[in-house]
Image (spheres, rainbow, N blue to C red):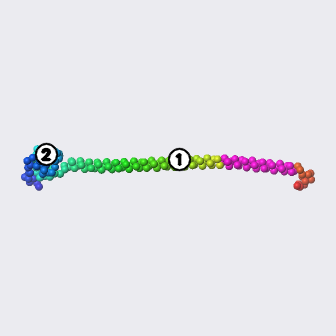
Amino acid sequence: MSQEENKRNIIRFDNAQELMDYIGVSRATLYRRMNAYNMKSSKRSFTQDELDSLKELPERQLKQSESKLNNDIIQKALRSNEILLNELKQNYDTQIQQKDKELSYKQSEIDKQAKQIETSDKQISELHTLLDQQQKLSAQLKLQLEEVSESKKGFWARLFGGK
């Protein structure tokens, strides 16, 4: 419709109640929408376009409700992300604690084995020392036995190398 036709098709209401019944909203909603479209609350004559506008939510309210809906969705997503992050952190902390325990246990095992190796090395060193002493004593004993057996031989046996 052109503006001229629209002006000719003016619909008049005797009171606000008739207008509310026509649009299908409460008094407060009617006045809020009239205010949103910069209409005076005392206005009783409307074009069809104005009435159609009053029946629908004003754009500002639509944007606000969309914005609120988007904010709600974002808040829910943030909360769920925060919950997931906390769960991941707890899981990570638990794994770190388990790995720390394993590491401590393995380190204590390594320390025990290092002490065992050190003890074994000392024992081996002592055994080498004792073996060396035993070999020296055996060699000395053998020399002493040879000297004693040499002294028991007679003159001719010593001279000709007899037994």
Quadrant containing the N terminus is bottom left
User: Is 79 left, or right, of 3 in this rendering?
Assistant: right
**Magenta stretch: dominant secondary structure:** helix
Residue sitting at x 78%, y 50%:
138
Residue drawn 83% across and 50% down?
Answer: 145
Residue at numbered disc 1: 104
Give percent across and percent down for residue 10.
8, 51
Let me know if residue 130 is in the magenta part.
yes
Q: Secondary structure at mark 2?
A: loop
For mark 2, what is the residue? 39
Secondary structure type for disc 1? helix
* Residue lying farthest to the right in this orientation: 156
Q: Amino acid at mark 1?
A: Ser
Residue at position x 8%, y 49% in the image:
12
Mark 1 or 2: the one toward you? 1
Whether residue 45 can be seen here = no
Start-end of magenta stretch:
121-150
- Residue 75 in view here: yes
Disc 2 crowd rating (10 Å Cα; few below 14, some 14-19, many 20+) is some
Quadrant housing the C terminus: bottom right
| x, y percent for residue 147 | 85, 49
Q: Residue at x 63, y 49 (%)?
A: 117
Q: CA distance from mark 1 to mark 2?
A: 78 Å
Q: Is residue 40 magenta?
A: no
Q: Nearer the viewer, residue 26 or 50?
A: 26
Q: Nearer the viewer, residue 119 or 128?
A: 119
Identify residue type, mark 2: Met
First in sequence, mark 1 or 2: give its number: 2
Horizontal relation, residue 104 to residue 144: left or right: left
Mark 1–mark 2 CB contact (< 8 Å): no
Q: Which mark is residue 14?
A: none
